[in-house]
Amino acid sequence: MTTEPSAGPLADLARHRFDYETAGLDVADVDADPMVQWQRWYREAGEAGCTEPNAFVLGSVDEEGWPQSRYILLRGADQRGFTFFTNYDSAKSRQMAATGRASMLFTWLQLHRQVRVLGEVVRVPDAESDEYFASRPQGSQVGAWSSPQSQPIPDRAWLEQRVQQMAGTFGDAPVPRPAFWGGWLLRPQRFEFWQGRPSRLHDRLRYTAEPTDGAATNWQIERLAP
Ligand SMILES: Cc1cc2nc3c(=O)[nH]c(=O)nc-3n(C[C@H](O)[C@H](O)[C@H](O)COP(=O)(O)O)c2cc1C
């Protein structure tokens, strides 16, 4: 992205169009492993100064078939998949537990990029949730104990009183992880990398996991029409 002083919003627009023209996406350019490709785009989003580049929209389907979306912060991305943390009694956790599936949407608008991911979800091992919970600021730890996430509550004062009570209970002692709070791992089965291009002729590359006999995943890559 350009860092030159702008002569006004219209001049910026013209430059952005130029940028998108140079930043195309082709099968020849991308890594055969979509997680490696995702990591490359994540690094570039950070370098481009995107706000909270690890924020993504988590999609799940509720008991009545309604699609449900909410932002979450990603806490891990490796060969196992994507890891994030939340309340296990929350609406999203109940939905993921019931269907075993979820979607993720990353958007890095400064780079005119989005990545869609579909996969199966499982809880991470307790030890991993313990380790992450222990790394959080104490205020967040007490907050996790205090908030019955997704449940109706009477008012703000009720919540603040719970926080005070919990903070009093723990005092200066280390705050243990509540059993109702922990991580989820999404194991990707499909990725789509989308790069904005001029004239709405965007680049879309979809990776689909092909069934294998337990060895490393084979990914089929296809270009989709914009
Ligand atoms: C940028 C951003 C990041 C968020 N990160 C998390 C997160 O990591 N974990 C979480 O439980 N909620 C997070 N939230 C709040 C969720 O969007 C949501 O309100 C909450 O998890 C309850 O969702 P549910 O009722 O569908 O389960 C975040 C919200 C925003 C806007």
Image: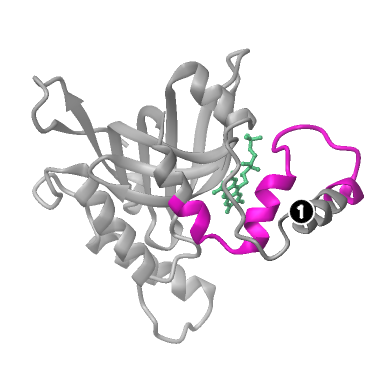
- Does residue 173 belong to the magenta stretch? no
Q: Nearer the viewer, residue 4 or 85?
A: 85
Q: Nearer the viewer, residue 75 or 11?
A: 75
- Does residue 141 belong to the magenta stretch? yes
Q: Position of residue 194 (x, y in %)?
A: 32, 45
**Res 195 seen here:** no
Q: Position of residue 46 (x, y in %)?
A: 38, 67
Distance from mark 1 CB to nearest ligand 1 atom below 8 Å: no
Looking at the rendered image, the quarter that the N terminus falls into is bottom left
Q: Position of residue 57 (x, y in %)?
A: 51, 42
Q: Position of residue 23 (x, y in %)?
A: 25, 60
Please state which amino acid type lies under the numbered disc 1.
Thr
Q: Residue at x 69, y 46 (%)?
A: 145
For residue 216, above or below residue 169: above
Q: Residue at x 41, y 44 (%)?
A: 127
How many marks on residues? 1
For residue 68, above or below residue 86: above
Q: Quick check: 102 left or right of 89?
A: left
Q: Nearer the viewer, residue 204 or 181?
A: 181
Q: Which residue is labeled 1 in the image?
A: 169
> Which residues are drawn in magenta?
131-159
- Which picture quadrant has residue 180? top right
Q: Residue at x 30, y 40 (%)?
A: 81
Chief secondary structure of the magenta portion = helix
For residue 47, above or below residue 222: below
**Res 119 seen here:** yes
Q: Quick check: 187 left or right of 27?
A: right
